[in-house]
Amino acid sequence: MNEKILIIENQITQFKMISEHLKTNGYHPIPSPEEYTGFLDYVRIQINPQYGETYKTECFNKIMEYITAQSPDLIIMDHILGGSCKCETGIGLALKLCKPIPIPIPVLFLSRTEHTEKNRVEEYEKFRNQQPGISEWTHKGYFGDGILEENYFKSHVIPSVERLLPKKKHTMMHTYIDTLTILNFYWPTHKSMLIELQKRLNDLSEIPDELWNMIKAHATNKNTNFNRSEIEILEQYTKK
Amino acid sequence: MNSTDQLTQYIEDLDGYKIQDTHFRIGSKYHSTSFFYAKRLFLNSYYTSRIALLIAKKIHTHVSDVHTKLTLIGYEMYSELLLSLIIKFLQDMHYEKVNHFIMVDANDCMRRIPEIKESIENYIIIVPIVSTGSTSVKISNEVKKLGISSDPLQYYHVICARDPKEEAVLESGTVETILQIKTQWHDPESCPLCFDDNCSKPLLETDKTDLTPTLIYDLPITKQLQNIDDDDNPGQKEEEKKDKIGKTGKVGMNFSDVIFDDSLLYKSVIRNDEYYIYSTDTEIFIEKNKDSIIEWLKKVKEDFNIDIASKIIIISPCHYSNTSFINMVNEILFNSSATIIYHQSDADYAENFKSLNHKYLNEDKKSGLQIYYVDDALISGKNFFKIYDLFRYTVNYSITEAMTGAIFLTNKSSADINTRVCRAAKKAHFFVAINMPLQHKVSNKNPLEHEKARYEALSGNTLHDDLRMAYSLKARELRDFNKKDTHAVRHLEMFKTIHKVYDYLGKLSKSTELKNLSFEEFLTACRNKDGAKLDKFVTMKILCQHPFILYLPVLHKTFEWHKQWLDETFFRLQESTKANSIGYEDFTELKFLIRRAVFLRNYRILTEDFFLLLSKIFSIIDSKNPSGSDNMTSNEYGSQKENIQDFYKYLACQYIEMIHMNGWCAKKLSDILKNVRFQTEQGKRFHRMLNNELAAVLAVFYDMLITEYHDKWINLYKPQEKETASPCTTIDDPENKNISDFLHQAQIESKNKFRIADQAMVLQTDNQYNPQFLNFLWIKLFLHNDNRSRIAGDELTYKTKILFDKLKGLFIHSHKIGAFFIIIDGRGQPHLVYDKDMYGYSLLKNISGNHWNFFARFLHKGNGDNKTVFEYLCKDEALWENLYNPEAAVPFIKNENCKWILMNRIGDKKQNSPIGLIGFYGQENRHDDILSKQLLMLLRDDLEHYVNHHHRNDEFAHLIIADATRRFAYLAGHGRQVMQSLANIDHEVFYPVVKTMEQLQFLFATKLLSSRNIYLRNEKNKADSDMLFHIFHCEPISKKILSQTMNRTLTMAQKIYEEEIVEVPQDVEITHDIQAPDESHFCFNSKLIEFICFELLINAKKNRFHFAKDIFYNTYKIKEEKNRLHIQFDLKATTLLIGIMGTGPSVSETIKRDIREGNQIKIYDEIAGLNLITKLIQIFNPGNRLYMESRKSPSAECIYENTLYVELKSENQKP
């Protein structure tokens, strides 16, 4: 446990509340309240088209530096980040953030934007097409008085977090296999590859059946021609 | 006579069952030059028994084992006699197990009579008459549906009447034809008998209910009566005279001497359960002809040789109209001494009649008892024969006890009834004899009822509201039996003409006498004794109506006369239109002839040259400066203006009727409409209307699809198993593959109804169904099935979304189309239920009140015209041209994605009022995409049902309430947490603003904005605005009040920037400035000013400049790390300018424009912040405005001083 969750939320009250709820449920929210103002300034500048390009690029680099350093397991992303101007939304930002990272971080969009809201559906669809299987959309669960109530957070947000966290492992696994199958194709002696595989896979605990099936299908589809003995080795390494 | 002559004579004497040189519709695929009246032939055992024996022998040869179990299957009820005779002969041949049933085609659906419960083993199909043999195949398929897998042992086609050029469907060895007859067939699409003016003939068909041709083969027969003054042959013996009187009866007056004025009733009488087209009001009739009637009755008295001293009884049917006449008869004939027995035949019992009247009616004849039947009219004879039978029953059918005579005021009976009554009554006297149209049933209905039903059907099937209305009015006119006859003079003329034409035709001994007559000669020949020739319009009119249209020789002749007349008129008008002139009489004559062409199916009006003439006439109608003094558009005919201006509608109605009578006319029209261009407005309207109406043939095809493939079709998207998923997901078929597969599988291309629709509308390209057509079928199916479900909330939203995705698919390049859907709920409030452009954005969500008016006039009954389709094209900037009326350009939105717009009004058929508007738009002009418009028109009824089903009920009302609640919550969601937190921080400063905001949000969410953000400027809205003025009433804003407001604003500003309620705390440098005269007339609500300042402050903080740590200096080499805020109030005599400047990044011109125009600034929120301020201040005064100015900060180039100004005016301000 104690997975790191990066919160990108433009309202400080909301940010504080989400942080508290995450802590209560055993997660490690970042940024800290002390880091929040500075980090969010980078975000706000990055998403606002009215700031100069150099200024924006510098801010984006700062955000990426932070993410690389912290290596969060999940991002909780607000949808509307930019106040009243025509700023980029959380979906656009998430797409940008995922692009340079070899293993994309799962994103939980937590927003009060309605599920059926017209533009949101198309925009989110675009994200899902580019980053399949690593995101969910959850409503903040309030319209009026209450703001992200604890019970609501526990019953609606935490299950999404729980579903998305292993996705990082899935995507890592997927990336390893992808790399290794290419190596396999060009490099007939598999020894070093398998050693690498063993090392990486051992870092990941409890690989579900579903993932294992995916590995096998993936290997076959890519014409990588794993032979029987190799499959056995793979099975062995993944405790199957 | 030698044997050859004898044989010839024998054959000549045989009955004929063929109508030759005719034009008959055979099924839906052929028009034939001859018709074989098989039904009559097979109902005559003289022929049938011979045929039955022949077939029985053939069966015996084929199936020699007499123990074989056989089932004979016939077709239509008239084959029953043939089949029962075959069975009889087979039984005579010792076949033991033979049964039979008949297949009957009822509304395109086969059913068996009787239902045989025994199992069918070997069956033989016997069809009395076939053309292609498709009926046999149809029967065989039906039999197989009963679970019998084997083919029939044999098909017997008794008569096969086929064009040798056409191939038979069944050519296998199992078919045996008894009698092969050659005939000539034409493809209805190009039938010369329809479309070749040189040889065209009226198209005849059989009554669908019983396959009987709706024809009478010869001329009408009239009543045989003699004039009361005419002496019988002086040399005739008394006995012979009596005999003749008994058969004929006497008439008192010539028809032309009788006064019918005022007493004639047109289609207003229901009597003996029959509807009569003409009747007479007896009271008025007697009054108008009193003297003549008295004179006549005196003659009748003489004729009967009445002895007053005798016992006299009058028997009469009891009804309201005959009492005056009976009293008159009693008084004049019998000195009021007769005993009158009234009998109410539908209420009184026969036994009671006998027991009550036995004593009177059985008195000794020697006592001089005389019994008369008296009634005001003889029509169907029902009353007479009921009473006559009772009388005969009462007198125990005694030979000596007979009726003395019968006296009727009018004799409107047919020839047969007349003879029967005269015979039964011994002596019958009539004041006048009238030839009345016979009440032939048409499709089991009386002619006028049938006509009413026909108009109702046309009203239902027509696509334009205008035309629907026209048909509906016609149907209503026929239904309203109590309505005053507004065309009494015309009807009297028609009534008299009918009598005279009947009279003349009845006197002709052979139809050949009619054959050689020209129309003019006919009009002269029908003249009455005063020598006046019949009016040709009235005569043609009645000849084209029931009953004359039923008489085959009359119909042929009328068709020919009409054709000549139409041609003459055509050429005459062709000449006069060259001079850009046409007289009103010519115009009405043409209209008259077009209408008759429809009745007679004279397709001369379906030619290109005829349409060119129409085009010219339209040009004259639309011309502002017609030449010629008698021109129909000159002021002289001002009263007929409406008639002329609605000519296009009149014409469209005529052609629509033709399409409904013969679908192939649609194909013909489609070709003509492609080639003939109409230059002026009326012509274009006509062209457009007719083009849309061609789609009716597709509706006919769809009906066939539903009838023939009902279960397969409606279950096309039915889930295989019971699924828990939404029903919408199961019909998600973007390419409509299920539908195209289904159509191919069912071989729809070969169906006649599809062929017609395809030819008229082009539904296929390169043997592939057009996607537009497939989308149409998908929508039809979806809406058909949707009818059964009741859904709510998001399901309805989703359903509407997928429905509209498909509706866009009715257009070519549908991905470039946007659409919207406005419906009016049960309370008359419009709601925007769908609104998406090609990119998924909204077009109408934020339209202003003025732009909303653009739609409002199409949505309310009585506003605007009663049109169905509207099409606009953006001409320049925000001015839109009405493509159907170029003079009426209107202002509308300016949007780069919307340059062309098409709207279809969804109407409530029953209420004849609009209930919704469906709109499509795009960047390109789609005016020429005809198919899409046709398909849309066809869907109007289904969409009407959809709206009524989902939106005009509680379900939608709940959705609206939920929507309003959600929107209120939505508004509050953003503000309330901030506000409440602020109020907690400093109650004194923020509480009044919190209160103001809550009041405003409630008003806006529930009152001032209707659902879906359509701002309605109607009466209800005015009341809601008044509520706003009442809560936030205006007061004079003095310098003092302004200073106090400034102080509070400064405190608010400090708190908002200091606290972390609105984002993180920020350092800020605040300055202010007030400019106010000592005295001012400016009035506004001070709470609202404070609220506005608060909103502007929040906005300023949110849009402050972000000084990112480390980076700002590195990037810009400037040290400024603090935002500035400047608040200014500038009060003038009648205005107040509030300005709040905050430093921030630059602001785009788009945002400035959006702020200025009151558009939505935030991406998703419906209304809040600046948008709320704009809407609020403009309710008080449309001149109030919010705008932004932005300039570079003097201290740093990257930082801007962005000032939001609110300018409030108190001139013309609402209270």
Image (cartoon, rainbow, N blue to C red):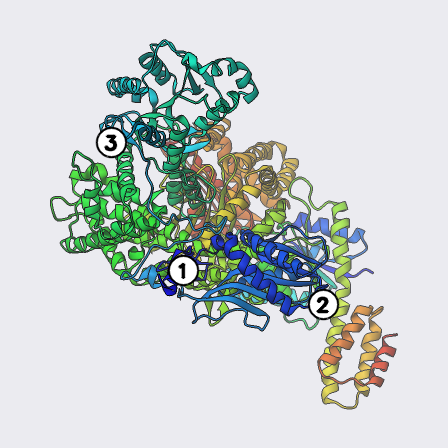
Distance, label 1 to label 2, CA atoms, is: 114 Å
Q: Nearer the viewer, mark 3 or mark 1?
A: 3
Residue beneath the point at 32% across and 61% down: B195
Q: Residue B1041 location, x and y as percent?
A: 47, 29
Name of the residue lying farthest toward the bottom? A188
**How many residues crowd mark 3 within 10 Å: few (<14), some (14–19), many (20+)?**
few
Task: Say which of B109 and A155 sits in front.
Answer: B109
Kind of residue indicated by mark 1? Ile
Q: Is residue B433 above or below residue B917?
A: above
Where's the N terminus of chain B, which quadrant? bottom left
Q: Secondary structure at mark 2?
A: helix
Of labels 3 and 1, earlier in sequence is: 1
Residue under pointer 1: B11
Q: Are marks 1 and 2 in contact (CB under 8 Å)?
A: no
Q: Chain of mark 3?
A: B
Task: Specify whether disc 3 shares its chain with disc 1.
Answer: yes
Q: Quadrant of residue B634?
A: top left
Q: Secondary structure at mark 3?
A: loop
Kind of residue indicated by mark 3? Asn
Distance, label 3 to label 1, CA atoms, is: 40 Å
Q: Residue B276 location, x and y as percent?
A: 39, 33
Q: Secondary structure at mark 1?
A: helix
Residue beneath the point at 37% across and 52% down: B658
Where's the C terminus of chain B, which quadrant? top left
Residue B1196 visible at all: yes
Residue B713 visible at all: no
Residue beneath the point at 48% across and 22% down: B391
Residue under pointer 2: A69
Task: Specify whether disc 1 shares its chain with disc 2.
Answer: no
Residue under pointer 3: B233
Side (left or right) of B651 relative to B1033: left
**How many residues crowd mark 2 within 10 Å: few (<14), some (14–19), many (20+)?**
few
